[in-house]
Image: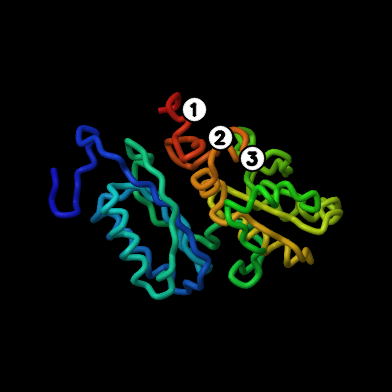
Amino acid sequence: MKNGNNFELERSDLTTFLIAALYKFVDLSDFADLKAPLLACCHDHKIKGTILLAAEGINGTIAGLPQNIYAVLEFLRRDPRLADLTHKESFADKLPFYRMKVRLKREIVTMGIPGINPNLMAGKYVKPEDWNQLLDDPDVVVIDVRNDYEVSIGTFKGAINPQTKSFSELPDWVRQQPALRHKPKVAMFCTGGIRCEKSTAFLRSEGFEEVYHLEGGILKYLETVPEAESHWEGECFVFDERVSVTHGLKPSFRSSDCS
C-alpha cells in the first residue's frame, strides 16, 4: 500500500531496495541531541539499518525504498555540518536489515587512540581508477586494515593482512612492524573508506609521511573499475544480510546460500 512517501515494505510489493552507506568525520559535539529526530525520520520513512553518532561524526548503512532513503539523506544534509555528506549506493531485492537503530558512541569507528582526527591528519586520497597504479608501485606497502574474517574471503593481490580480530588491534600491530618503514609509501584500504581514513591519520601521527588510502573503499573500487582490469581477488564482506558482494556490487553466491 502506498501513502505519500510511506510504503509498507512487504515482500509481495517486490521492489528493488536502495542500500546507502555513509560516513563523515565532523565535529558533532551535540550528537546526543541528534538521535531522537533522526530515528523518528527513519521510522517515518520505513528505513532499516544502523547509524552511529559520536562527537567525531556519523557512520551508518541504511536501506529502504529509494525515495525514502533520499528523504533521510536530505534530512541529514539540512544540518550545515553534514551538507556535503556523501554516500555509496547498492541495491537488493529484499531488505538486508530487520530494524532501525541510531546509537550513540564514543567513536564512529573504534580505534581507541585519543587525539586522532582524520579531518586534519588523514592520508592522501587515491581515486579507484588510480588505485591499480599505486598497487603496482614497488615502493608501496599495501595494507588491508579490515579484520581477518573479512580479508579471508577477498582482498587485493599482494596486500598485507594484519590478522586482527578488531580494528582496535591495528595500532599495536603497526607499532610492532618496523618492516613497514622499509618502503617510502604506505597504502591502506577498507570496505567503505572510514577505517582507512582513521588508519592513515594514525600512521601520520606515528611519523609516516607518505600515506595513501583508497577513496570510497573497496565498494567504490568494485563499482568503478571494470572486472577485466581489477586487481581484486574474491568477494567483499559487507555487514548486512547480503554477506558479501562482487564486482558491480552484485550480491555473491555466498549471499544467496545464506539467505
State how far apart marks 2 and 1 are (Cα): 9 Å
* Colour pattern of the rendering: rainbow
What amino acid type is highlighted by mark number 2? Answer: Glu
SS for dot 3: loop
Check contact, mark 2 vs mark 1: CB within 8 A: yes
Q: Which residue is mark 3?
A: 231
Compared with residue 100, is residue 156 higher up or lower down, i.e. above or below?
above
Q: Which residue is mark 1?
A: 254
Q: Which residue is mark 2?
A: 235
**Quadrant of the image containing the C terminus:** top left
Nearer to us in this view, 187 or 115:
187
> Residue drawn at (67%, 46%), measured in percent from left and top?
144
Q: Position of residue 71 (x, y in %)?
A: 28, 59
Q: Position of residue 19 (x, y in %)?
A: 38, 47
Give the side of residue 121 with respect to residue 13, left or right.
Answer: right
Give the side of residue 132 with respect to residue 35, left or right.
Answer: right
